[in-house]
Image: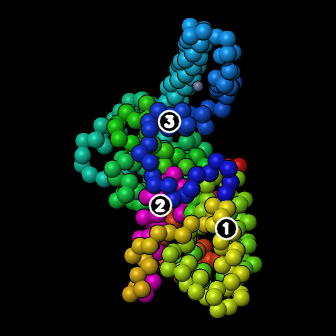
Amino acid sequence: MAPGIPPFTTPMKKYQKRDFKEDSSSRRLENMSTRIAIHPSHSVVPESDNSDDSSAGNYFDFCSQLKKEVDDIFHSSLNSVVKKSCKCKNRFFLLATSDDAFFKKTHVFLESEGHVSVQPSDFFKREIRSSPLLIIVRNVDIAKHIFEVPHLLELRKSPHVQFAGIDEPEDVVNLTYQELFITGGFVMFDREAIESISSDNINKVWGILKTLCKTGKWKWVLHYRDSRCLKENARLCPKAREKEYLLNKCKEEGLLDILSYHECDLMTRQEPNYLQCLCHQQVQNISARYPVFVSDLKTDCRFEKNGIMTMTVDSFLMGLISKTTNRFV
Ligand SMILES: [Zn+2]
Ligand SMILES: [Zn+2]
Ligand SMILES: [Zn+2]
């Protein structure tokens, strides 16, 4: 498992606004790095052996004072950058799911702050394609409605598109929103693709995931029932044994997750409802940018409409990296 990459199945934690703010701002504002670099001074260790209580107290006062100043500088500069950027064309699209006054209020507030509302038909207009576009969804709408965002898959692929979950109309301007679909993704093979995959190709998938993980958290997810099937086959046939061995290696590296038992695994069921399952997985892993479904059967267009990338086994092995890394180059 790559260092610093937490397990993929960690339940979506209730975000802490402040954490998020510092997180996303540091990503956005590279020019602030010189100021952030002051932080290592926190680790200066006082000569505590011969220091009495008051000097230790001074040290800690100094440290917290420094921290406060750094944070103040950081946040006031950040705010001014954000305010400045509000004056230029920052495009947004707010997913309104009802007549609730919340949406009108948010829309009006964003426009009063200089942001420009755009219609889905203008998302990819050539002349403005390179200006940032923020797709805003109310947090309570995520589970039920996030897949209704028009052109969701194309939006994910655009490096200039960010997704924000909000609780309050002011969350975007105050940078207290939750960032959604940030980086990385997860890959689900259908049952046939998993049953027929060769050891060589498992190695290839492994390599692809390792490469992708350099730019974000990527995982291969496997249904419980499929993993049981592979285990049973491994007892009977050496080829299946090799596959199982490789999959276990992937699991040890944190690149493969066996999903916990759910309705897709019922023996009474012919096959999983992959669309529903992938949408559910996406909501559970809301920071993942790409859900990928790999199947050699013809997948219906509802997958793409719901923002899910679909690929055949071959196209996955040949091209996933080029299809998803545009955000990072
Ligand atoms: Zn600090
Ligand atoms: Zn308007
Ligand atoms: Zn499932």
For mark 3, give the secondary structure.
helix
Q: How is the image coloured?
A: rainbow
Instruction: Specify whether residue 84 is in view.
Output: no
Residue type (three-letter) at the residue carrying disc 1: Cys
The residue at label 3 has a CB less than 8 Å from ligand 1: no
For mark 1, give the secondary structure.
helix
- Image quadrant in which you'd find residue 106: top left
- Compared to 192, does 111 lie above or below? above
Residue that mark 2 sits on: 282
Write the residue at 39% across / 42% down. 166
Residue in the foreground of this view, choosing between 274 and 311: 274
Look at the numbered discs 1 and 3 and tell me whether their residues touch, using CB distance below 8 Å.
no
Percent x, y of residue 97? 31, 53
Q: Decide if residue 190 is on the left or right side of residue 109.
A: right
**Foreground: disc 2 or disc 1:** 1
- Where is ligand 1, by quadrant? top right
Q: Decide if residue 289 is on the left or right side of residue 148.
A: right
**Foreground: disc 1 or disc 3:** 1
Mark 2 or mark 1, earlier in chain: 1
Between the C-alphas of marks 1 and 3, the distance is 31 Å
Residue type (three-letter) at the residue carrying disc 3: Asp
Write the residue at 55% across / 72% down. 222
Residue neighbourhood size for the residue with mark 3, other residues' Cα within 10 Å, grouped as few (<14), some (14–19), many (≥20): few
Return the mark for residue 122: none
Return the mark for residue 250: 1
Residue neighbourhood size for the residue with mark 2, other residues' Cα within 10 Å, grouped as few (<14), some (14–19), many (≥20): many
Residue that mark 3 sits on: 19
Residue type (three-letter) at the residue carrying disc 2: Gln
Look at the numbered discs 2 and 1 and tell me whether their residues touch, using CB distance below 8 Å.
no
In magenta, the rendered stretch is 270-293
The question of residue 292 being in magenta is answered with yes
Q: How many marks?
A: 3
